[in-house]
Amino acid sequence: MTLFFLVKYLHLLGAIVILGTGTGIAFFMLMAHRTGDAAFIARTAATVVIADMIFTLSAVLLQPVSGGVLMALSATGIAERWLLASLALYAVAGLFWVPVIFMQIEMRNLARMAAEKNQPLPPRYFALFRRWFLFGIPGFGSVMIILWLMIAKPF
């Protein structure tokens, strides 16, 4: 196994973790939200926040490192259009992902308070959920396009 192959494998693994964790988080948050059960939402959101911090964050940090090593090993220039587009989309994904972390934390806290007080979820929770959902579209969509660009290198 060559160093290039090992780094490429780690880079691909990072992309898989980002996509897989993102998909899983979106699914579990949506399913918990649909129940309307504040205690269940709080438990689910607590797990989601941990998963985002452990899996997504580590993969997000690994991607530029492994990508930079791949560039050096393959003599790929930073000016390649597919790479520039990927980096721009990575920034877009990050701009939408970082606020989502804070939204998930606040939704978890609001759901916990509602469950502890045996009250319905407050309007702020629903506003955050809508924003969280909407932020997921460009955030996740950017990652999907990056994956295609990494594979196809169309330009």
Image (cartoon, helix red, strand yellow):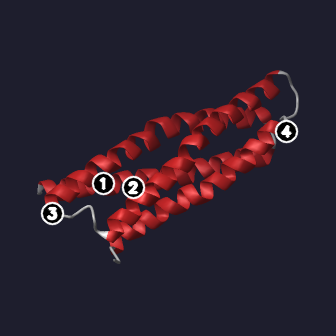
Question: In the figure, residue 76 lies in which quadrant?
Answer: bottom left
Q: Is residue 118 left or right of residue 86?
A: right
Q: At numbered mark 1, what does the secondary structure look like: helix, strand or loop?
A: helix
Q: Is residue 112 left or right of residue 16?
A: right
Labelled pair 4, 1 in contact (Cβ < 8 Å): no
Indicate the position of residue 154 as horizontal and vertical percent values: 35, 77
Q: Residues within 10 Å of mark 4 (few under 14, many from 20)?
A: few
Residue extending furthest toward the front? 79
Give the residue drawn at x 77%, y 49%.
34
Indicate the position of residue 88 as horizontal and vertical percent values: 43, 59
Q: Which amino acid type corresponds to the residue marked 2 in the rendered image?
A: Ala
The N terminus - image quarter: bottom left
Q: Is residue 137 left or right of residue 146?
A: right
Tell me how far mark 2 sits from mark 1, CA to CA.
6 Å
Q: Which residue is mark 1?
A: 11
Labelled pair 2, 1 in contact (Cβ < 8 Å): yes
Indicate the position of residue 142 as horizontal and vertical percent values: 50, 61
Q: Residues within 10 Å of mark 2 (few under 14, many from 20)?
A: many
Give the residue drawn at x 34%, y 53%.
13
Labelled pair 4, 2 in contact (Cβ < 8 Å): no
Q: Which amino acid type corresponds to the residue marked 1 in the rendered image?
A: His
Q: At numbered mark 3, what does the secondary structure look like: helix, strand or loop?
A: loop
Q: Which residue is mark 4?
A: 123
Q: Which mark is residue 15?
A: 2
Residue 5, compared with residue 149, is above or below; it is above
Q: Residues within 10 Å of mark 3 (few under 14, many from 20)?
A: few
Q: Which residue is mark 3?
A: 75
